[in-house]
Image: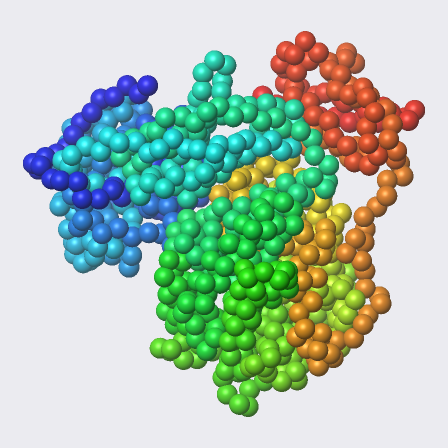
Amino acid sequence: MHKLFTVLLVFFALSFPVVAQDYVIFSDSPDKVFYDWSWGYVNGGSTLERAGEKFPVDTAHHFSGTNSLRLHWKSKAGGDWGIAVAQMGTPWPVQDITKKDSLSFWVFAKDSIAKSDLPLLYMEDNTNKKSSRVMLSSIGDGLPAGKWVKIQIPLSLFTPGSQGADLTIIKTIFFGQDKADLNEHFLYIDEIRMSTSGSASDTLPPNTPSGVIAKGFDSHIDLLWSPNQESDLAGYYIYKQDGNSFKLLGTASRDDHVFTDFVGAPGMTATYKVSAYDARGNESGSSGQVSATTKALNDDEMLSMVEESTFRYFWDYAHPSSGMARERTGSANTVTTGGSGMGIMAILTGIERGFITREQGISRMKRILNFLTLADKFHGALPHWMDGSTGKVIPFSQYDNGGDLVETAFLMQGLLAARQYFNKNTTDEDIIRVLSTALWEGVEWNWYLKDASSTLLFWHWSPNYAWQINMALQGWNETMITYLLAIASPTHSIPASDYENGWASGSSYKNGKSYYGYPLYVGWDYFGPLFFAHYSYLGFDPRGKKDKYANYFINNRNATLINRAYCIDNPKKFTGYNENTWGLTASDDPETGYAAHQPVQVDNGTIAPTAALSSMPYTPNESIAALKNFYHTYGAKLYGPYGFKDAFNVQKNWFDNNYLAIDQGPIVVMIENYRSELLWKNFMANSEISPMLAKIGFVEDTTTVSVKEGVQSVRTFELKGSYPNPFNSATTIEFMIPARQKVEAFVYDMLGRKVATLLNKEMQQGKNRVSWNGRNERNENVSSGIYIYTIRSGGKQLTGKMILQK
């Protein structure tokens, strides 16, 4: 329980009726290091703690949930600082503060803070205009040490100010420097919200979550439940058993009904309960207890695990009305056209892998197709972004409020695969085929040539700004599929010659150089970001064929190996890069927000798991090794309810908390293409595809490599090492044996004394793993230090070293 000392700064009568739920600006941060929806600055000798440019998060102090914001500052005369906090969402949501009358938040001062030393507050609107400033020193009392205090401020004190801020589109609340007292201050801030003060108290909690299950995987446990339907639902609390009681483990947003607990090793059992809470803080009763145990997984099971988690982004996190893929986590109603094409392919994968039934997939597909049929279109092309409830265009930029031909191509790639997959003679599957065909045949690809003399397709057209953006599609980049589909169209095709005279006509198309010993036939120097090898090949199978320039499977395979070799070479000496930590592509970025990472030109130490994992068909051995390294070394920060998060940077100790549709989609699709060729087979089976390839001039190429190339048979007893190493709570030792045989595994200290017996049984042929949790044979925790592990099998013995750090 919290020890509360409440100060209410209330200056108005408490007699208003309930009108609407609170604007919850901050309740809990998904990331335990920084709050992503924030930004801060400091200058002139003042100091302000920031995590990068973000608001630091503190897990040791919290009024509710699992963390708070840590405001740590020192104000100097002539200096200045400020740090903003916004509601979670992408783009950052705006609030009409004229509809609320009070701003409240809870604060906890490490040491007492005098009234005169408190910070000031101001608002900023969506055009970056600032409101008037409100000095806490002028309206409240000082803060005592070590107690949670509630501060409540009338919103009427915030006016448009000299910059003319629009109070109906407020984006952020700033905490800023007031008096320069040269003293260091710590203030923890929680539960920032705007509400209608004095309203009748809402004490009705949400319903208790139902359908709660727990599933154990290799080193994590997933909790899943049925989503609550209350309009004022704020989120969910997850509790974990600790001895005889349950302690709060974390929270999930109202849009999530999955929670991942990364326990760190196989053989761990945990028990959980889930409750729901609303915008007023009312909490439901707890669900029944559910338990699960982690278990070591082989490579094939690991691939299924990643596919299932990633699939959930497109199934559980899809827009509730349309079924379309949201642009990214936190994007509310903003759905993405291209990402939804990838999501449709993920649905087909989910059916094949048993994550959902065929009937469930059919129902979702009909919802998506009905939405797309009625959505805004511009000469048959859909916009980049739409409102998932209405189907109306959401501008991607000032002039980009019309058709996006590339996003439309990514969508059509998915619809054509689905049209072939749903091939049963039933009314529902007939509907899917008919609606998919209508959308496909409705795209006026030839309109996007801009004029009759053009051999180049153009990316955008706007009903207001026409061809203002003027971005031609010319290789090398991710847009090859746009030309393939435009040539294949049975209703609005472009000439096949436009492939060579348009798409392949750019100076950066042909390459012909070698990098790190790998020839690159097509592409920029070092190829560019790896998504160039993914987006156009989710449905289009590049194996066994070539045009006059390249076999694109081989070219993409070499590009992937070049990307990996560059990371191993690591010319910029970033911490973390190695043979199993690689993959540069477009992703979130700790410095710029988002960047198209690639060798040499755009490389700041940021790795995106989608780069290596979506290259699975090209480099299966290297990609599986990267997958296991990402999971076992960084999983506690990098793996969550929808699989691997978007990016991380070891050099900066930055781990993104976001998921993006266009990065999650290629992971699940390309892993499935590696395993079963599902999406390749269905897309290529469309009757329009083979004639299109023949028109362009693609011919059979028997020099291609198999999708399974490089999968090696195990002929020797081999030790792969332990990871993570050094480790804190647990580490996993991986080894290979040439046949099913007995294996013994032991841990020794540096004096040669046996500490633990890990294995003494027969193991399967191939790759195997065993974990050690830092305990001895009496199940006691051992001290930090260096330990030796020994694996014995087939008359041979292999040893390795690991470091336990506590």
Q: Which residue in the rendered view is the most extreme toward the right?
A: 795
- Going 86% across and 24% down the picture, which residue do you hit? 742
Q: Which residue lies furthest to the left in this view?
A: 13
Query: What's the residue at 74%, 30% (across, down)?
Result: 769
Is residue 66 visible in the rendered image? The answer is no
Q: Which of 119 and 639 is in front in this view?
A: 639
Q: Position of residue 59 (x, y in %)?
A: 42, 29
Position of 163 compared to 796: left or right?
Answer: left
Residue 52: quarter of image:
top left
Q: In which quarter of the image is residue 466?
A: bottom left
Residue situated furthest bottom in the rendering: 453
Looking at the image, which residue is at 71% across and 57% down? 677
Q: Is residue 672 left or right of residue 709?
A: left
User: Where does residue 737 sit, x and y in percent of width and height?
Assistant: 85, 33
Percent coordinates x, y for residue 118 in the rendering: 22, 34
> Is 92 rendered above or below residue 387?
above
Quarter of the rendering occupied by the N terminus: top left
User: Where does the C terminus fall, quadrant-wise?
Assistant: top right
Judge by depth and name the residue closer to the eye, 155 or 783.
155
Left or right: residue 228 versus residue 625 is left
Horizontal side of 513 relative to 283 (left or right) equals: right
Which residue is rendered at x = 78% and y = 27% of the image? 800
Q: Does the image show residue 344?
A: yes
Q: Is residue 33 above or below residue 170?
A: above
Query: In this view, which residue lies farthest toward the front?
Result: 426
Q: In this view, does 705 lie above or below 60?
A: below
Image coordinates of residue 577 in percent, x first then y, are: 65, 45
Q: How is the image coloured?
A: rainbow
